[in-house]
Image (cartoon, coloured by chain):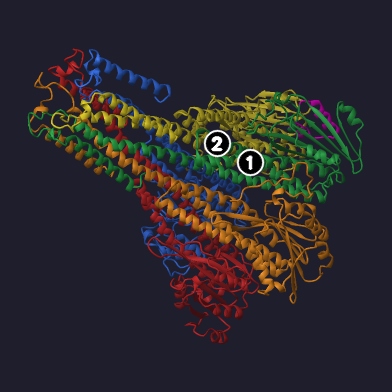
Chain colours: A red, B blue, C yellow, D green, E orange
Amino acid sequence: MMVWQKRYSPPGASPGTLHLPSALRGDVRITAIHYSPGAYSEEEIIDLDDFLRTAPGDGVLWINMDGLGDVSALEKLGQHWNLHPLSLEDVLNVPQRSKMEDYEHYAFLTFRTAFMEAPQHVCMEQVSLFWGTSYVLTFQDEAEHDAFEPVRNRIRHRRGHIRQHGADYLAYALLDAAIDSFFPVLETLGEELEALEEAVLKAPTRETMEAIHAIRRTLTHLRRVIWPTREMVHAFAHSESERMTGSTRVFLRDCYDHVLQVLDVLESYRDLGGSLMETYLSAQSYRMNEVMKVLTIIATIFIPLTFIAGIYGMNFDGAKSPLNMPELQWYWGYPFSLALMAGLALCLVVFFRRKGWF
Amino acid sequence: MMVWQKRYSPPGASPGTLHLPSALRGDVRITAIHYSPGAYSEEEIIDLDDFLRTAPGDGVLWINMDGLGDVSALEKLGQHWNLHPLSLEDVLNVPQRSKMEDYEHYAFLTFRTAFMEAPQHVCMEQVSLFWGTSYVLTFQDEAEHDAFEPVRNRIRHRRGHIRQHGADYLAYALLDAAIDSFFPVLETLGEELEALEEAVLKAPTRETMEAIHAIRRTLTHLRRVIWPTREMVHAFAHSESERMTGSTRVFLRDCYDHVLQVLDVLESYRDLGGSLMETYLSAQSYRMNEVMKVLTIIATIFIPLTFIAGIYGMNFDGAKSPLNMPELQWYWGYPFSLALMAGLALCLVVFFRRKGWF
Amino acid sequence: MMVWQKRYSPPGASPGTLHLPSALRGDVRITAIHYSPGAYSEEEIIDLDDFLRTAPGDGVLWINMDGLGDVSALEKLGQHWNLHPLSLEDVLNVPQRSKMEDYEHYAFLTFRTAFMEAPQHVCMEQVSLFWGTSYVLTFQDEAEHDAFEPVRNRIRHRRGHIRQHGADYLAYALLDAAIDSFFPVLETLGEELEALEEAVLKAPTRETMEAIHAIRRTLTHLRRVIWPTREMVHAFAHSESERMTGSTRVFLRDCYDHVLQVLDVLESYRDLGGSLMETYLSAQSYRMNEVMKVLTIIATIFIPLTFIAGIYGMNFDGAKSPLNMPELQWYWGYPFSLALMAGLALCLVVFFRRKGWF
Amino acid sequence: MMVWQKRYSPPGASPGTLHLPSALRGDVRITAIHYSPGAYSEEEIIDLDDFLRTAPGDGVLWINMDGLGDVSALEKLGQHWNLHPLSLEDVLNVPQRSKMEDYEHYAFLTFRTAFMEAPQHVCMEQVSLFWGTSYVLTFQDEAEHDAFEPVRNRIRHRRGHIRQHGADYLAYALLDAAIDSFFPVLETLGEELEALEEAVLKAPTRETMEAIHAIRRTLTHLRRVIWPTREMVHAFAHSESERMTGSTRVFLRDCYDHVLQVLDVLESYRDLGGSLMETYLSAQSYRMNEVMKVLTIIATIFIPLTFIAGIYGMNFDGAKSPLNMPELQWYWGYPFSLALMAGLALCLVVFFRRKGWF
Amino acid sequence: MMVWQKRYSPPGASPGTLHLPSALRGDVRITAIHYSPGAYSEEEIIDLDDFLRTAPGDGVLWINMDGLGDVSALEKLGQHWNLHPLSLEDVLNVPQRSKMEDYEHYAFLTFRTAFMEAPQHVCMEQVSLFWGTSYVLTFQDEAEHDAFEPVRNRIRHRRGHIRQHGADYLAYALLDAAIDSFFPVLETLGEELEALEEAVLKAPTRETMEAIHAIRRTLTHLRRVIWPTREMVHAFAHSESERMTGSTRVFLRDCYDHVLQVLDVLESYRDLGGSLMETYLSAQSYRMNEVMKVLTIIATIFIPLTFIAGIYGMNFDGAKSPLNMPELQWYWGYPFSLALMAGLALCLVVFFRRKGWF
């Protein structure tokens, strides 16, 4: 499960200066895709200065940076498209709250993609996206994972209308891919919840409880991430920028719907998690009580019997008085005492059964 | 109970392309009803191309598709009335969040109907509805179930004013039928809650607990479905389209009221479910405690008695000393010991009773 | 306690047709009061057609129908004042959500009155009210109960200003009487809550728990009824109709205040109910634990004693070895063993007491 | 703790008639303070008619009535300043929901002051305030308590600017004094919560639980009172009356802040109360479990020992067979049996300790 | 943990008079920083009158007062910049609710900084900030702690753009520093929550429970502080004053984001705290039940065995009757009885194991 990380710049940092937390250092891979309805090219950028000098002016340019380790590249991109220092700083401050910030000549969006790392491990990656008139820049904080391959394939193979649309549609497509990445995660969580539900009702163990606690924590965390995403998609869909075309707005409305769906599912999973914990407690206490009841019944039946045996183990001297335990001298004494005990046990069993205790 | 299903298109799918999840493949039945105040015809469509070519232009045309297995039919209908690819895609993505989307020449609504499959099984069916100037298209994802027969009968038998109104009234009537389908389900749930309430107060078992958990889950799920329906009916009633007449708007206000009523009932059922779980826990612990108390009391009374019997079972040699258990040699020794035990038991019983323990 | 009833028309019913659920059939009593500042008449209507033909045009006419069994009377009234079929249908659909619907020439309000039937039974009656320029029609679904007698008396005896005002004031006065009918019910519930509180803290029984559960259910139900009433009174007070005079608006503001007060009280009662349940559980577990503690202490003290008695009940043969239980042959053997037991018991008692266990 | 009282007028009462609930009858004391920047007079009013006839027209006049027993005085004041019957009625209906009602020539405010009666008793007093161009009338329902003495002193001793301002500032000052009266109460509650917190963590008893329940009830009640006060102060601060000066508006903003602060504190106290109850339950169960654990361990250790003693108390006849309990005839028999028991006890102790049970 | 303090002025105080609570008396240190893009000076103020007389008119002047013990200095500053008495009073009333108040020629902000005093101690300091055209005044209530050193360093060393901007940017920078001071505190709390989580799942003790309770209380308190801060930053960012430049507004948007992030984290921590308490209770009850189960099983196995031993300890006289315990005279009697006991014990163990009890 993702842990909340330090996001604050080192004390004394001026807002808007770029500083890379050591945790984010690592390899960086920058790729560029340039396309127009008719043309398409894709390359990995080695020399960024060179690339920016010769970058074409028409069509849509999408530069993606996997990993945040190269601060100077970020600065160069910022200078080339005149991006606000605060937005650049937000790229490096991980994790950010999902948000959209509208500047005059571009918009800055930050959001998350989700994926399962191990079967039980929900991970998230922060994506920062700059959307200008004819370009989209994306920054992903983890170099290994990439949620945008499907979008790339649609550009490459001219699937759908993506090549016909501008940068606004590309920004939408990337955002939609990010939100869609939550659905398989939700599904996995849903399956785990169902497995837990069965475990709770069938055979609850200590591990069940820990798993319920863990899944509740994950759901709380996901909700914290998705809640501001809702606002962000809303703000994006209602952006008043003229770079946004009406047709993309229609698609964004659909995207907003998906976020709401994610939230709905999360909320009902959270409900379910709480209800599961209650049911777990009640099921476990039920099982425990069953155990205790049977054991106590056994004990309770034998205690009076042992008492009777104790009576006839007393050493009163029958020689001194005919009143002193004459039963011990009776011909039928022993069978009588055994019968007494059996009768008493029977009475108790009948009594318990009539009370409905077992 | 309905389980949350995969809704996402296969990775790499472009938004707006039609792809049928394998779970939805199956038989499809397309029917058309065409009516005007004076005329009425009903037929099952075999050749859709042919039908669309000869479809009449006046009156109201309602095409209903039971089952979603025929993607090509959906595409043909989409081309004929120029429907947005996103709406068509939403028809196949099951389940959808209830919503209304306003396009220039038509509106797209998606919502659910509810029904009881088995006595204990709440099921839901997704309905997608396209509402244009003179046509209504509906798509239901399950071929076996149909919630719209009453509306069909009203058209057939000219009951009410439906034949006098246009497509807007038909869309309303279908939506109203869908929402009304929740009332019998709620009633069944209400009856089950009452049965559970009685079981909890009379004789709570493990099954009671499982049933409470199950009904709470169902209520959570229903609420997740109904909550966005409220917004949708509101949006529909306040649609600014000129295809909406004032008289239908009045009826929609009534329909909105019904959704609110469903939500009110759901909320108080959810409250009741939570309160039931608490009451169950407390009732069960009460019963368990009663059992434990009686058993412990029996044990506690006999333990001191057994102790006394143990005393007189000791083998101190009375021959060696007159102090060694002289009671054993007394004439009244045994009766005395029995009386001692009886007296002690009585004291304990009186003490417990005075404390109010049984 | 009122149970949620079927509200839906039989399947296939067209919205706006009048159909009487069989549960509502029964005797009907229609009364008319006609008044103006100077005049006043009151009569029971036998022949409605006749009455409507000769109804006076000036002053305020209030027709009240107790019981809903006479659908034809409802239809006649609807035709006479040109009421929308949907409103008429809502009169028969019991229970309705409280609401106000504004039509051009009249407004339709539906709300509830509350009363105690048995000492422990909260009942509600649905009132439907049509408010036109010079008339008010009211429909109550239960023939036996009537919350409007005080208003009638004010008209009869010219108390207050009611005779000086028009139909808007009468509608207000009836609504206010309905809302005021909740206060005695709340007071009864408040008294019961206090009684339960005392029971919980003094001597909680199984009945206490059931009563807490029942009162929580009643409060949930009342809240469900009152919540929409708030909106309705708000809508009524802000009605833009010119039939509403400024002075009545001032009174409605007061009426709105009363609804808020009812809601405030309900909310804090609900809080109290939840807190009571928790306190009950904790008090009961406290009592149970007290019982278990004392019993266990008794058992624990006697178990070691019984063990010692068991030791000296062993049959090791002192004749074979001087090591075999020489105590049995001692002169002070028996007193020594008794002292040993008494000492051990004392130690345990002191130990328990020091630990603060009793 | 204050108990919810009957507020409803007797059935049949017309809204706007004055009727004094018997609980409010009692002594009444009416005082008048008249001031202007330069002058100041204070008197107790004996003959109200006389006073009103000769009341000065300039400066600010503040009439305060302690106790509500004199309905005729209320009526006279109402006639003199032409107050709406509904407001006068609200003065007598105790308790009222805090509210402000704007009339053309005056405003009516009702709110509460709080004070501690006994060390553990939170009391509230209802204050009704009429604010006109040059006068303020206040009515307090309890004759003994008075929250306005500090304001009087400021007028008397010309402290602050109160003598320079008009009636609006006086109304503000009184309202502010009322809200400030909640702070000492909150502080007392905060101290009690802290004491309870310590008690819960150190030595929870039955009284602790009752005290937690009581304080939660008090907090619920206070919140019910303060919540509408917030709205009221807001409405007062945004009153559009021209009697309100800009400088008083600034002070009211401060007053609004105080209400919010009271609410914030209340909310976190309520949170704390709920958390305390949970902690109490858990602490008590912890203590109980500790007790049970030690006792059970003692019992469990002695039970096997007693069993061994029981074995050697059996009466098998060694004379009949060398197999019949030869231990009894051994030279080291008794020491062997004691060692066996001691060894077993030791094993159990080590086992329990290794399991971490004590 | 910070405790809620008396905020109310002594009874009878007029709003707007300065009175220093004794708790705040102590040493005071006043420093002044004056800067413009090109110049910079810093000094500690000894003679305030003198300083104010010679204060430069251009550039930005920031006067900071550490500790609130010098009321006369506060008054002098208030007179020099014509500050409203209410704002000055709010400086001394500690703690204040975070708020912004807009006056014509300046704005008054009050907020908190947070820091860890001891490893486990969250402390907060109230900061009052006056923001005028060319000056910023800040007041911190604790003399020892200072959250603004980073801002000072940025001014001193010309880091970032702070020297290029006006007083609005300085106010923003200080507010941002205050909000950023919450992040390390949150991180510490997050680490403690994780430690508690591990403790709960591994080895819950009484201290764990107390720590959970304490951290929940701290989170409740922090939320109470941060919630109004959100509104305040919002109000500040949307201030309509012309002293606010567009570029600072962009930075404030970022600052608002940080507050939201703090709130998000707090909310999910609060969720986590509640879930932890539930998990603690369930884990502890699980452990306890494990203990009880093993102990009870041991007891239950030995009770029947002891009963059998008791049987053969009875003293029925075999000489009187061949039926009286003939087993005692059997050759294999003793081995038989031991085998009987072993067999019974085995049966019970097998039975328990098959039931899955250990």
Q: Which residues are magenta?
A: D69-89
Inspect the image, locate mark 2, and give the three-letter code of the amino acid beneath it.
His
Which residue is denoted by mark 2 in the rendering? D213
In this picture, residue E92 sits left or right of residue E200 = right
Within 10 angstroms of label 2, few (less than 14), some, or many (20 or more) residues? many
Q: Quadrant of residue C226?
A: top right
Inspect the image, locate mark 1, and give the three-letter code of the amino acid beneath it.
Arg
Compared with A64, B342 (above or below) is: above
Residue at image location 40% in from the left, 42% down from the top: A282
- Residue A59 horizontal/vertical position (percent): 55, 80
Q: Nearer the viewer, residue C83 or E353?
A: E353
Residue at image location 24% in from the left, 20% down from the top: B325
Q: How many badges with numbers are in the image?
A: 2
Label 2 sits on a secondary structure element that is helix
- Residue E249 horizontal/vertical position (percent): 69, 66
Compared with D189, E23 (above or below) is: below
Q: Quadrant of residue C326?
A: top left
- Residue D49 horizontal/vertical position (percent): 88, 27
